[in-house]
Image (spheres, rainbow, N blue to C red):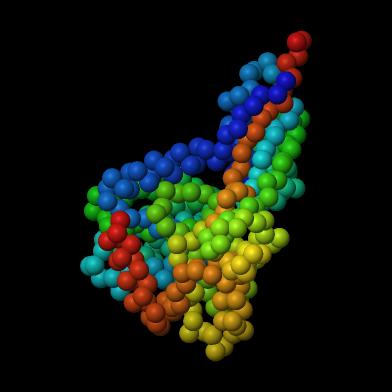
Amino acid sequence: MNIPVVENVLKLNDEIAAENRRTLKDAGVVTITLIGSPGSGKTTLLETTLKSLGNDLSVGLLTGDIATSRDAERLAPHSPHVAQINTGGSCHLDANQIKQGMKQLPLDKLDLLIIENVGNLICPVGFDLGQDAKIGLFSVPEGDDKPAKHPRIVLEASLLVLNKIDLIPYVSFDRDVFYGDLKSMREDAPVMELSATTGEGIDNWLDWLRRLADEG
Amino acid sequence: MHETAIAASLLEQVRQYIAPEAVLQCVHLQIGRMEHLEETVFQAAWSAMTNDTPFADSTLTIEWVPILVRCRKCQGEYTPEDRAIMICPKCDSAYPEILQGSGIILKSLDIDIPGE
């Protein structure tokens, strides 16, 4: 006997993500998810962001890792609203982990919530968390071929950030390859270059965040 | 290894449809080519996940759904040969809107009810 079903396998995740989205919208919080490989500079970018934003925006952070609270410890000096999510072994955050994490943050006091996903350019893309925008973070030492190897983040991200541009003179990274591959996938892909350590390009990034928070 | 998480989600979903007296034979899935899923890994994840359950002998079939893209420039529709090359064969630009090829859908379940 065949029982017809026709149901999204990630239905439960998507339902919780929709609930998160409603809760955040009702609280007036704009939410972004930062997706990038291990070592691409996600936490460093967030440290620089928090330091540079000053009191412009009240930012909450949910930071996901398989183990340790090191990222939360790094970010805590720069924001009173930081919570660590440990996934145990999972390669991505899911909507329920965000729902639990949100309970640790005073949403009514926040303008912007930044979710730092587990370091991984693949798995996190498939799980809706309830965010308003996905940011894909690439970095120069990873190589110029990362967009071509990770098409889904290129297609789905509201913004792509190329970090560590200060290292271009020292490593093998060809901007023509990077941008050529992007052009083959999404000609109008929004890309921003910056260095979270030297601060180059950070102003553009902060403006983008402020605009997003304003529009939200 | 998000195949494990998806297999776990699928298991929870399947449980809702299977009466205690029924034997699950096969799970039919429809998966878009844009999804980051590898079939052998997913099959292994399902086996591992169902190992200690009444569904241990069940199998999975996957119908892969090709990617269908609409060009936002010329409105033409096409199936890209490679996920990393979305160039429209008609106007040679890459302004893709994904119409089809996303999603992991539980289509149906084959069950047997002993004695019937």
Figure disc tally: 0
Which residue is rendered at x = 56% and y = 58% of the image?
Answer: B75
Which residue is rendered at x = 28% and y = 70% of the image?
Answer: A53
Given residues A154 and A169, the one toward you in this image is A154
Q: Residue furthest bottom?
A: A169
The answer to whether residue A47 shows anywhere in this view is no
Location of residue A194 in the rendering, given as x and y in whole percent from the top left corner: 43, 78
Location of residue A101 in the rendering, given as x and y in whole percent from the top left corner: 39, 48
Above or below for A117 versus B16: below
Location of residue A132 in the rendering, given as x and y in whole percent from the top left corner: 39, 54
Which residue is rendered at x = 30% and y = 53% of the image?
Answer: A29
Given residues A102 and A74, the one toward you in this image is A102
Lateral position of residue A214 relative to residue A74, left or right: left
Above or below for B105 versus A178: above
Image quarter in which the C terminus of chain B is found: top right
Lateral position of residue A18 relative to residue B42, left or right: left
The answer to whether residue A92 shows anywhere in this view is yes
Quarter-wise, where is residue B94 in the image? Answer: bottom right
Location of residue A106 in the rendering, given as x and y in whole percent from the top left corner: 27, 50
Quarter-wise, where is residue A60 in the image? Answer: bottom left
Which residue is rendered at x = 62% and y = 55% of the image?
Answer: B77
Lateral position of residue B107 relative to residue A109, left or right: right
Lateral position of residue A86 relative to residue B14, left or right: left
Above or below for A198 versus A103: below
